[in-house]
Amino acid sequence: MSYLVDERKKSSVFSGYMASPKLKVGPLAAALVVLVLFALSVAAQRVYVYEVESDVEIAEDVPHVPGISGRFGEQLLVVWVPRDVAPGIILFTNETAPIPLYDRKYFLLVVPADARPNQRARAEAFLKTPDGTYPVVFRKPDKGILYTIAHSIEDALDILKQIGLQPEYRGKAELKRIDTAKRDPDAGRETDATPAQVSMPSLGSTFDVYGGLYFRETPVFTIGQVIIPVHGTRSACTNVQGAAYVGYDAKRLLVGTLITGWGSINADLIVEVYRIQNDGSCTLLGSQNFVLMSGTIYTVSLVNPTTSVNQLAVVLKLNVRSYSGSPRVSAFASVLYTRTYRYGFEVGEFSARTAPGSFEQWKTVRRIVIGPYVAYDGYIAQTASSSLRLEIHTAPVNGFCKDLRVRFTINGRMPSGTYTYRGRGGGSVCFYDVNLPSFWQSGFQDEYFFSKALGGGLFWVLDIEYTDGTTPYVNSIYMFDAEAFRYWRWAEQWKTTPGAIDGIWAFPFLSSAVQLYAGPTEPGEPKIYHGLVTIRTDTIERDQRVVLTISGREIFTRIYNVYYIRRAEIDLWMRLSVQGIKVIGAAYLMPDSQINPITAPQWLEIALRVKDAVDLLLTLTGIGGRTVGLLLFVAGKGLESAGGSVTVQVLNDNTARITYRRGWADVASDTIIVPLTIPSLSWRDTPTELKITQLCLDGYCVNPSLKAYVQPDLVHYAIPIHSYLKNWMFRGQVSGVASYYRP
Amino acid sequence: MQGKMSVFFLLLVVVFSLLWFVWPWSWLVGVFVAGLVFLWSLFFASCVGLRRGFVVVFGLVAAPLALAPVVEPLFLWYAVAPLAVFVVLVYAASKAYGLLWGFLFVVGSLWLHVIILAAVDLLTGGLLSQAFDIGFDVYVRWNVPLIAFMDVSSLYISCRAVKLIFAYVKRRRG
């Protein structure tokens, strides 16, 4: 239960902080609010809540009961609740927590208490409840609500009360389809399993590409219309405030909402869809209203392949009817695009990794959580893979190693196979080499899309038990250097000619990224290491073709102590020669987005020169200098290590090692930017592949084999047709104007 | 009495250097450097005869090392501070032996301890050289306490030895 709450808190990482203003309500207005609340409570609709076992999974088509009328028309609300919650560990913090596991065939259905279904309607399924049987048909949701996620039945009832319903739990029910075989969306899921890393998509192919829109968390302190503004400083429309850019060829848009803070809110979510004109102004195509609920995903049908022949933008608004306390509304959106891979467009890679390490347990463990990793924008459908691998060490039962069954799920919601592993050893310990033999593409795709719509990330939940149903006593878990998730990312450039489109994207880049998690290798203060390395292969400066961004934090989760990255080593490989590679202007990225050069402070430089001069004198005294001695060691090495450094070393003709060392007097920043020049990249007229073969962040080393592509030299390529670009970026698309390259 | 005080400061240097194992890698390293310089100076001065005034003087010599991350020009002091410590030590020794013999006492002790350290380095297959080469490293921490222990213990021996030599020379002359 608490884990879900945590997930929701994490979601706020993606939304900007907006201080909630103090409630300033006069006595008259307060009385009005109370009156409205009273009126609503009187008028609240009674609904029955059934705990449903379904014979097939609910997907995009949701249940409707023909003939009934309620707040949601004929639609029945689907609320996912965990099938069970069991003790588990969040591996990278070594924290014990109750971990829920959802089942796509188990959910709550919300039916109006006075529902009078049209019994003569043609039913596709029947819902058998203690109160009678309802005929059910499946179609796209009438009221746009795809589903709601709750962390318990009580939580689900609270969510329903929050929107002014009077829910009553009526017990278990059964949803049985008439023709199951034809309609099971899970049928064939196992056949799209991918065993290993997916190769780079080929030119000319058309993909489904996923992106995200990000909105600011909005406090509600007024009745009436409230805009949920988009992140960033600029609206996608010159004439409409707070608009988020959707763009061309969007097939589907999902919006998700979370209500946090205390109190309740009765409101509609309004999604306005605009068409962006050539001059940057927008005209309204239409708007859709939804009942605002926490943990709920809505489908916005106005964004579809027909409307997105033009560039689209969306504005989110709330129409607040009443509220109490100080609720805050967070909104997120996932967009599914169609894209064709052509020359001039590029793809990058994202790799979410586990660093090798041993995690001591010495307790009964039923579930293991690995992650969460960010659902990085630009994921290309059908290109995900995973090579998750861990070794579980358990205490033998009566001297024997029983077979271990491991159920893999993404986010505890989307299954990705169940496999049985045979134990080795015996005596005092059993070893289970748990590796993921195959990866379910469509499950990952759905969970990526839905999780992103609620601002969430992606993590593995492994449910482990012996084949006889008992829970193992786990001594320790060893993680291998492996990929939790890996996928290709769409990296898109819009050209300025012809058509002068999309001039709103600032600082374009193509980037590949590796996200790294590591944890304590021995019992002790719980800590987690979180690293992110991106490789960008085009920048505004012509001679800085490759830029590495290296972030790292070691977080002590219990005492809230954080160390910023202190050491990094990155091996960069390319087919061309790396001779002559240089670091130019390495810098710290400060929390306020300012750049702070990593060069020794001026006085430190002078001091080092003075020290050279004094050293000779000190050598004669025997106190130090070129001889040994504590005093000069302390002063001399203290001086030398005060300033940070980024150095590059050519290991062989194709590999260079970039080494960063933090100086003890350096500024407080968790991110360094390392621009590199590589002479052989100049004058190239074809793309060049770069690969990070190994990276070590503060001693946590992985071999990601992460690829990025340097575009042809700008002199040949970019003048003058590509002076404006836009791209998929970490944390969504950010608006702005930038001249890409002007000779 | 002096011998006991030297042992006391010797232990203080060693104990303080052990803090390096948990010392945070931040501007506080400046404080560590200042602390070690201060204690080492007191230790060596205690061998020749420590007076209360020197505590203040060595404190003033060491303090800028801790403040350098805040006041950048003070980084220059890292280059000059060892020389300043040397001068104060010679001054301290000159109180007991006169300027020339005081100078020779300090230089003699230091050189003898350098020779002892070189011998130890040779015997341990370059362990000390390796420890010196590592310098201040955020992850490799064993070298600083080792250097501190070897340095002060060899300096203790060399200082005592030079003292005995000086006493012998004085007797022969006297």
Image (cartoon, grey):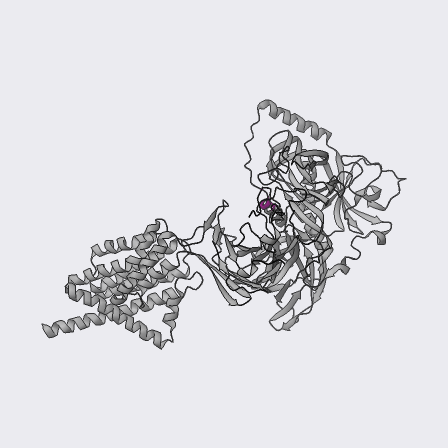
Q: Nearer the viewer, residue A287 or A425?
A: A287
Residue B51 location, x and y as percent?
Answer: 20, 58
The residue lying at 36 percent from left, 61 percent from top is: A637
Drawn side of residue A734 relative to residue B160, left or right: right
Q: Residue at x 45, y 62 (%)?
A: B139
Residue A250 found in image quarter: top right
Residue B115 appears in which quarter of the rendering?
A: bottom left
Q: Quadrant of residue B96?
A: bottom left
Point out the stretch of residues depicted in magenta. A11-15
Residue at position x 74%, y 51% in the image: A104
Residue extending furthest left? Answer: B174
Note whether A691 is above or below A271 in the view shown: below
| Magenta residue check for A14 | yes
Residue A417: x and y, percent? 72, 60
Rendering coords of residue A514 (x, y %): 59, 57
Above or below, comparing residue A60 to residue A387 in the picture:
above
User: Is residue A393 highlighted in magenta?
Assistant: no
A726 lies above or below B117: above
Determine the residue located farthest toward the top in the rendered image: A28
Q: Residue furthest right?
A: A120
Q: Main secondary structure of the magenta part?
A: helix
